[in-house]
Each structure stands twice: as C-alpha cells, then as structure tokens.
Image (cartoon, rainbow, N blue to C red):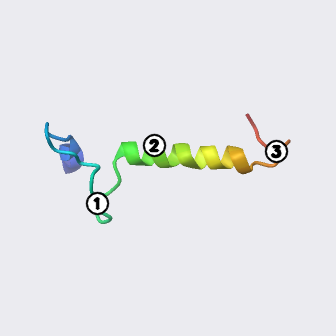
Amino acid sequence: MAKEKQVAEPGKTVAKKPNPKREPTALQIYAEAEECVFHAKRTAIPGQSES
C-alpha cells in the first residue's frame, strides 16, 4: 500500500487540519473508538453491560 507515507516528518503536524477526503489515521480511529466505548459505558443500562 502506498499509504505508508503518513508518518509525520519532524516539524510537521499531520493531525492539525483533518482532511475529510483523507482516510483517518489509526490514532484518530483509536481515539474515536475510545470515545464510543466511553459513551457506551456511560449510557449503558445497568445489568446489560458485558464487562
């Protein structure tokens, strides 16, 4: 895959301006997943969560 060039060069911040057309980085996906889990745990009905 040619998308391996997403490594930020020193002095360049990749995550500053998220480009909607560019695929999200693994870090963004991870952060979103964490948020989803956080909200799911908060809004979970007591007795229905599996962990």
Q: Secondary structure at mark 1?
A: loop
- Asked whether 50 or 19 is in front, the reply is 19
Q: Residues within 10 Å of mark 2 (few under 14, many from 20)?
A: few
Disc 3 designates what residue?
48
Location of residue 11 by image quarter: top left
Residue 30 is labelled as 2
At 82% from the left edge and 45% from the top edge, which residue is drawn?
A: 48
Q: In 3D space, how far apart are the residues under numbered discs 1 and 2 (Cα atoms)? A: 16 Å
Q: Is residue 48 left or right of residue 12?
A: right
Q: Name the secondary structure under disc 2.
A: helix
Q: Residue at x 27, y 52 (%)?
A: 16
Task: Name the residue that disc number 1 marks.
Answer: 22
Q: Alpha-carbon distance for marks 3 and 1?
A: 37 Å
The residue at the point 30 percent across, 58 percent down is 18
Residue 33: x and y in percent read: 52, 46
Q: Secondary structure at mark 3?
A: loop
Q: Residues within 10 Å of mark 1 (few under 14, many from 20)?
A: few
Residue projecting furthest to the bottom:
21
